[in-house]
């Protein structure tokens, strides 16, 4: 009657949800990243958004999960470096507050990567 989900399955679904929604929001509302002063920022944003959606779908459907989380880890690390690290100039609590979702997502992605790395052996 009820299907039981393992912890890693729930983590995969929640992580995929966050990245798919994030990618969709970047496509629907490009002004979301208007404060970033990056060269070719619109093109980069659309590429990142499509990558988030595609990799999120792979994670959700449990296909090529290990390969799909690698670009997502790179995206989240880049987001932390570009958008959150400058907040350290104000104070560490501001940085931690603003980066909380990014930090949690990074930990979940590393957990997924580790789980799918050891299960291949």
Image (cartoon, grey):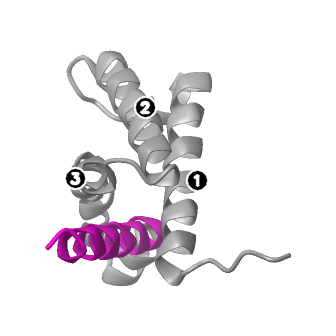
Position above or below: 26 against 105 = above
How many labels sit on residues? 3
**Which residue shows up at 20% across the image and 21% down it?**
39
Q: Residue under label 3, please give it.
A: 70
Position above or below: 83 against 20 = below
* SS at circle 3: helix
**Which residue shows up at 32% across the image and 65% down it?**
87
Q: Residues within 10 Å of mark 2 (few under 14, many from 20)?
A: many
**Which residue shows up at 26% across the image and 57% down it?**
66
Q: Residue under label 1, please give it.
A: 17
Q: Residue under label 2, please give it.
A: 49
Instruction: Point out which mark residue 112 bears.
Output: none
Kindly check if marks 2 and 3 are in contact, taking CB atoms under 8 A apart as contact: no
Q: Which residues are magenta?
A: 100-121
Q: Relative to 93, is 10 on the left or the right? A: right
Query: Depth check: 13 or 61 in front?
Result: 61
Question: Residue 1's x, y, as percent?
Answer: 86, 76
Query: Depth check: 50 or 11 in front?
Result: 11
> Which badge, 3 or 1, comes first in the chain's sequence?
1
Q: Relative to 31, is 68 on the left or the right? A: left
Say which of marks 2 and 3 sits in front: 3
């Amino acid at each position: 009657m009820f299907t039981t989900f393992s912890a890693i399955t729930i983590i995969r679904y929640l992580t995929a949800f966050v990245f798919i929604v994030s990618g969709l929001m970047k496509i629907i509302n490009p002004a979301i990243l208007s404060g970033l002063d990056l060269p070719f920022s619109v093109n980069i944003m659309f590429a990142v958004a499509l990558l988030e959606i595609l990799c999120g779908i792979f994670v959700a459907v449990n296909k090529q999960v290990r390969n799909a989380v690698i670009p997502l880890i790179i995206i989240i690390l880049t987001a932390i470096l570009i958008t959150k690290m400058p907040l350290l100039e104000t104070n560490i609590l501001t940085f931690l507050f603003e980066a909380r979702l990014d930090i949690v997502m990074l930990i979940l992605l590393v957990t997924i990567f580790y789980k799918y790395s050891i299960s291949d052996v």
